[in-house]
Amino acid sequence: MDAEPVDAAPAESAEVAAVQERYARFAREEAPARSALYAAWASGVAEDPGIAGILARIPAVRRQPPLVFAVSRLLGAPLAGFAEWAGWVRAHAEALAEETDRRSLQTNEPLRCAALLPALALIEGPVALLELGASAGLCLYPDRYSYRYDRDGETIALDPAGGASRVVLRSELAGDPRLRMPRVGWRGGIDLAPRDAADPEDRRFLETLVWPGEEGRAARIRAALDIARDDPLTLLRGDASDPAVLARAVSLVPEELTLVVTTPGVLPHVPRAGRERIVETLSRGEIAGRPLRWITIDPRELHGAWRGPVSAEAEGFVLALDAEPLATVDPLGARVVWHRGSGAPRG
């Protein structure tokens, strides 16, 4: 890493302005409810053209505030105010740009399973789960976690057959979806850069993606990583928008299981052309002649594949089964608002 502070190299003013606007929006709309520290860092970037110029060296697809902040922490940036963080950035500008360029956001949040579970409950098992953008696969163990849904002053509890899990997922629930533990006979995922739950460096990176101030989340991810480490799944390296990669993954799925493909929050991070290929393929309901069910969690405006009305008033992402909207959910699983009783079990 650089031993001496360096100044930002000259950057196109438009690029610097774009960084400042992006970080201002993050500070204003995304960070305050989750991390006061990240809100302060982002506000500082928005007001400091020098730091914004350093971040402008990073390719636009890697400049997301949560990724830049996480990578800086991974490299040793202090969990301190903006002035101290900015000083660290100036001293390590080259290392930060290089490391961020080779990383990507891989928010492997097991709590998303609390949002997936009501859709999974509509599918008769046993199932084979195939997640696109799986990272370390922590959203592929819904049968290994405990759930506590808080609804109207009561708590609905579900546990694995063997008893309470070391990972307990708590979520707010509105409405009356069917809730039951899934029967999972196979689990696998595809990712451009799969993470190994047994690898110390991969574990550290996934934990660093947790925002400062999110109490309990890092411990939950550590416990889920332990489950994944002790019960390894099939993870393929590749581009899930490539039909050949999808076909290869599907060929590994035992024929007797119902194939369920999940895309929980990943599609917004896929470039548009690839995203459109994925949506078109999954909307057909089969891959290489193999029938499938598709569970997704997406922003409502992300695509036009919905097979039913999408509430314009409800906050959150859309949970859908076979593109049929079922609920609006917090994208990380902390809230589920059930809107429909459709999606009857089949297959």
Image: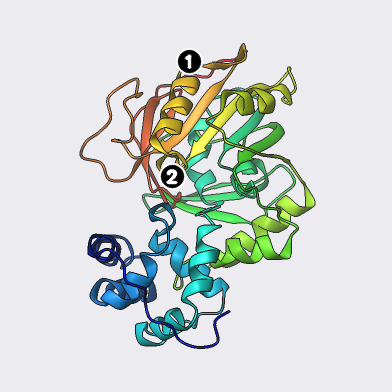
Question: Residue beneath label 2, please?
Answer: 269
| The C terminus, quarter of image | top right
Residue 301 visible in image: yes
Q: Work out how far the residue at label 2 is from the one at label 1, CA to CA, in angstroms.
A: 22 Å
Foreground pick, 309 / 82: 82
Q: What is the crowding at mark 1: few (fewer than 14 residues within 10 Å), some, or many (at least 20)?
A: few
For residue 235, side relative to residue 331 (left or right): right
From the top left corner, tell me how far across and down residue 82 is, in percent. Answer: 36, 82
Is 298 located above or below residue 60 in the figure?
A: above
Helix, strand or loop at disc 2? helix
- For the point 41% across and 24% down, the residue is 323
* Disc nearer the start of the sequence (2/1): 2
Residue 284, numbered label:
1
Q: Nearer the viewer, mark 2 or mark 1?
A: 2
| The N terminus, quarter of image | bottom right
- For the point 31% across and 68% down, the residue is 32
Helix, strand or loop at disc 1? loop
